[in-house]
Amino acid sequence: MESLIEKLCTSWVPDMVLHIPTKAILGRGYTIAKINFFIMLRYIVHEIDDFNELEADLFSIISANVFTLTAEEVFITIIEDMRISREVRNQAGSLIVRIWEHRIDYGVREFAPILQQLWKSRGKLVPNFGTMMGFSELCMLSRDTETRWFDFLQRDDLSEEEVLSLEEFIFGLTWEEIQNLRKNMEEKGRSSLSREEVESLLDKPHLYPGYWTDDPRELYRSFRDRKHNSKFRARAAVRGPRKTLEEYLMIFLLAGFPEDDTAL
């Protein structure tokens, strides 16, 4: 296990995929297959009145597998970023190897419970937009999240980029869209915006999908979209979040618990 972590954390991004064990690749495929199978099963039970009560259980199973897939993506993204300290990347490597080793036995709640809490809370959140400050949304998001989430938010060295990534996560919009909305409010002397006004002002499909809707896979899509956008900003050296909120949060936690990543 230690040699695999060492190899993952010292390999450059282009060839990292060549160092991933076959078991991990097959396990990832198995997780995706389970997601697709249970989604198909959910469609079937939805059409049969006698089985309708099973739909909520199937939704939970699908969500759990999507959480695991997304958590895996978070840890891989951290490992790939050579700008992050080796200690943090080693901790992320330890977690990803544990997922690969015990994927069938455990879910993401065993590996990164705070991520699951955060995603579940976001799934229940319907942004009000309003003043575009995000205070009410943040309160709702934090209501069912553990204390380490508050440790992350309240620390003195919370960076501007981390705040911007939080705004993207809360509003479900790109940072650029958020800036355009705020600029419009300033130009027109508005103090708040309704959801309908936000949709009208954007006047185009949102880049980021809804976090929950009726398909838990949208969570994974949203993370991937935010990740790709943040990587573009980092390469182009333009303003805006250069990592996703999930990455910033896990980097903070991994740096704070270097000797006991099981606490995550």
Image (cartoon, helix red, strand yellow):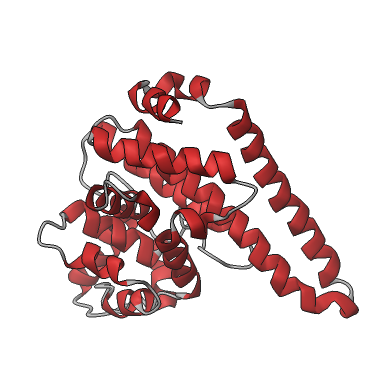
**For the point 36% across and 31% down, which residue is it?**
80
Figure check: 114 above or below 255: below
Position of residue 25 relative to residue 215, above or below, is above
Quadrant in which the C terminus is drawn: bottom left
Is residue 216 among the parts visible in the rendering? no
Residue at the (40%, 22%) spot, across then down: 7
Q: Is residue 213 visible?
A: yes
Q: Is residue 127 left or right of residue 18?
A: left
Residue 2, located in which quarter of the rendered image? top left
Q: Where is residue 148 in the image (x, y as percent from the top left)?
A: 28, 66
Q: Which of 143 and 206 is in front in this view?
A: 143
| Whole-percent x, y for residue 150 in the image | 25, 70
Residue at far left of view: 156
Measuring from the top left, give residue 205's x and y in whole percent: 50, 57
- Say left or right for 102 vs 162: right
Lateral position of residue 66 relative to residue 131, left or right? right
Task: Please tell me which residue lies in front, 165 or 75.
Answer: 75
The total of numbered circles placed on residues is 0
Q: Which picture quadrant has residue 232?
A: top left
Could you tell me which residue is drawn at 55 percent across and 51 percent down?
68
Q: In this view, does 225 lie above or below 56?
A: above
Between residue 113 and residue 47, name the one nearer to us: 113
Q: Residue 84: x and y, percent?
A: 24, 36
